[in-house]
Image: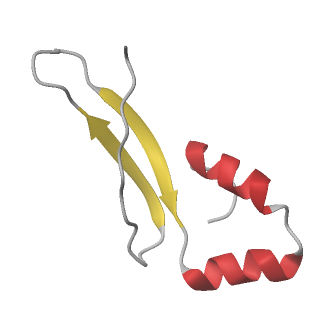
């Protein structure tokens, strides 16, 4: 039905990552970006009072905090 579930664990290396998903028998690939924050970056955002719901949404598009 066009849905997939994936469980992944991030490391402590911050940055943007291009993720490519493939399925056997399907020629097109899904490519999307994910952002990984270090614990220090998360703590700084929390200390600044940033709305973490917006940060998490922003991370999908890999822009905002560097």
Query: Residue 41, image x and y in percent?
Result: 64, 78
Residue 24's image quarter? top left
Residue that sits furthest to the front in the current view? 1
Q: Residue at x 37, y 39 (%)?
A: 5
Viewer-proximal residue among 50 and 24: 24
Residue 52's image quarter? bottom right
Query: Residue 63, image x and y in percent?
Result: 63, 50
Residue that sits furthest to the left in the current view? 25
Residue 43 appears left or right of 34? right
Residue 36 appears left or right of 56? left
Quadrant of the image for the C terminus? bottom right
Residue that sits furthest to the right in the current view? 49
Residue 38 appears left or right of 3? right
Q: Residue at x 39, y 24 (%)?
A: 3
Residue 50 appears left or right of 30? right
Q: What colour scheme has been applied to the protein in the rendered image?
A: secondary structure
Does residue 52 sit above or below 49 in this rendering?
above
Query: Residue 38, image x and y in percent?
Result: 53, 78
Residue 11's image quarter? bottom left
Quadrant of the image for the N terminus? top left
Does residue 18 sit above or below 37 in this rendering?
above
Query: Residue 56, image x and y in percent?
Result: 67, 54
| Count of marks, rendered view | 0
Does residue 2 sit above or below 35 in this rendering?
above
Does residue 8 sit above or below 42 in this rendering?
above
Q: Residue at x 21, y 30 (%)?
A: 22
Q: Residue at x 66, y 76 (%)?
A: 42
């Amino acid at each position: 039905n066009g849905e997939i579930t994936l469980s992944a664990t991030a490391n402590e290396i911050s940055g943007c990552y291009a993720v490519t998903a493939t399925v056997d028998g399907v020629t097109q690939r899904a490519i999307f970006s994910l952002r990984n924050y270090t614990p220090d970056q998360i703590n700084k955002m929390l200390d600044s009072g940033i709305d973490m719901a917006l940060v998490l949404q922003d991370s999908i598009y890999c822009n905002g905090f560097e």
